[in-house]
Image (cartoon, grey):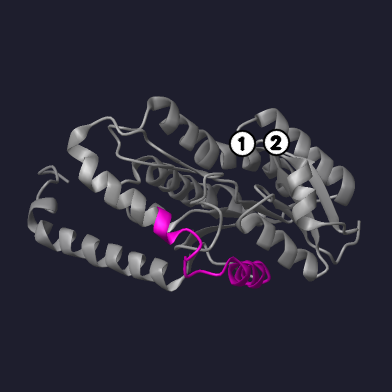
């Protein structure tokens, strides 16, 4: 182990943002544990590097998570930064999404990061240091039509990470939620995106409009994942990393609109809200 090098543990490093994250970190001379369900794909995407360890990891498997963390520590001696990046996308109207699809969305995008973080935390607690970065979304700040399952998983990430922060901060462990807008990744490709089968006529017109819109955005998203990778490195080097980073002008717009909407809803019913206390309170 080289003490001055940071060890990054990245999930979903075989495609999409995970590849950009791993390449950018390796370029800084730091060490990367790049994980994915298909290790051949991960290795092909990242090439050979003495600072790289490729490990099999299906985030939905707690046993895989434990084994991957052990392999990381055996190789590099520590884990400084965990990036919960692995994700998928199930698009569709709530009534048309099957229960299996909804559960698959939650298993990968919410329970998966929990599995990996649970495996990493004993290492970080022992070190009395670490940084957990979880990739949420603009859909973790505000819900969108045709995004019920995906937004549910990302809203879950938000609540879990916000609650985890005060639990682990006494051990010197930082947490950061990343809220990307639309970045030019493979999330909307057939490899990562699944759409509900049409089954309810009432949704037909809007379904077609929404699915066409997502298909049209694929490959044309404004966000540059390589720049996001550099932003993550910058954040990780700060003495006190932010608990949240809004990534992209579109995500900033979503967050600002959410703030405005919440404030308007608070003000509209402020008197009623503040009248609900018990008389002796």
Residue in the image at 23% along x and 40% along y: 204
Residue at point 78% right, 43% down? 40
Q: Tell me if residue 249 comes above or below residue 79 in the rendering.
A: below
Magenta span has 240? no
Q: Helix, strand, or loop for circle 1? A: helix
Relative to 70, residue 130 above or below: below
6 is higher (above) or lower (below) than 33 = below
Dot 1 or dot 2, earlier in sequence: 2
Q: Is mark 2 on a helix, strand or loop?
A: helix
Q: Where is residue 184 in the image (x, y as percent from the top left)?
A: 53, 63
- In the picture provided, is 22 more to the left or to the right than 156? right
Q: Is residue 227 magenta?
A: yes
Disc 1 + disc 2, Cβ < 8 Å = yes
Location of residue 218 in the rendering, given as x and y in whole percent from the top left corner: 47, 58
What x and y, as percent, mark residue 8? 74, 56
Residue 202 in sight here? yes
* Chief SS of the magenta region: helix
Spatial distance from mark 1 to mark 2, Cα to Cα?
A: 7 Å
Q: Where is residue 265 in the image (x, y as percent from the top left)?
A: 16, 59
Neighbour tally class for label 1: few under 14, some 14-19, many 20 plus, Cα within 10 Å: many
Residue 115, numbered label: 1
Mark identifier at residue 65? 2
> Which image quadrant for residue 91?
top left
Residue 145 visible here: no
Q: Quadrant of the N terminus?
A: bottom right
Compare residues 3 and 103 and report the one nearer the observer: 103
Magenta-highlighted residues: 215-238
């Amino acid at each position: 182990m080289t003490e001055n090098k940071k060890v990054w543990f990245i999930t979903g490093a075989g495609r999409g943002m995970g590849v950009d994250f791993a390449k950018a970190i390796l370029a800084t001379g730091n060490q990367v544990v790049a994980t994915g369900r298909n290790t051949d794909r991960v290795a092909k995407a990242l090439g050979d590097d003495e600072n790289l360890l490729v490990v099999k990891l299906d985030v939905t498997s707690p046993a895989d998570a434990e084994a991957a963390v052990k392999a990381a520590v055996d190789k590099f001696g520590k884990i400084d930064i965990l990036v919960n990046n692995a994700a998928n996308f199930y698009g569709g109207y709530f009534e048309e999404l099957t229960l299996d699809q909804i559960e698959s969305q939650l298993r990968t995008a919410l329970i998966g990061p929990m599995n990996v973080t649970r495996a990493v935390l004993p290492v970080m607690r022992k070190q009395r240091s670490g940084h957990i970065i979880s990739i949420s979304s603009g859909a973790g700040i505000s819900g969108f039509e045709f995004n019920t399952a995906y937004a549910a998983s990302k809203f879950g990430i938000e609540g879990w990470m916000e609650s985890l922060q005060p639990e682990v901060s006494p051990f010197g462990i930082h947490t950061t939620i990343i809220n990307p807008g639309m970045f030019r990744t493979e999330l909307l490709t057939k490899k990562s995106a699944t759409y509900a089968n049409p089954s309810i006529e009432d949704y037909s017109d809007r379904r077609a409009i929404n699915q066409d819109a997502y298909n049209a955005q694929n490959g044309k998203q404004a966000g540059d994942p390589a720049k996001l990778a550099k932003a993550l490195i910058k954040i990780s080097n700060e003495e006190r990393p932010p608990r949240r980073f809004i990534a992209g002008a579109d995500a900033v717009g979503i967050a600002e609109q959410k703030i405005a909407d919440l404030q308007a809803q608070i003000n509209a019913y402020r008197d009623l809200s503040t009248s609900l206390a018990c008389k002796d309170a």
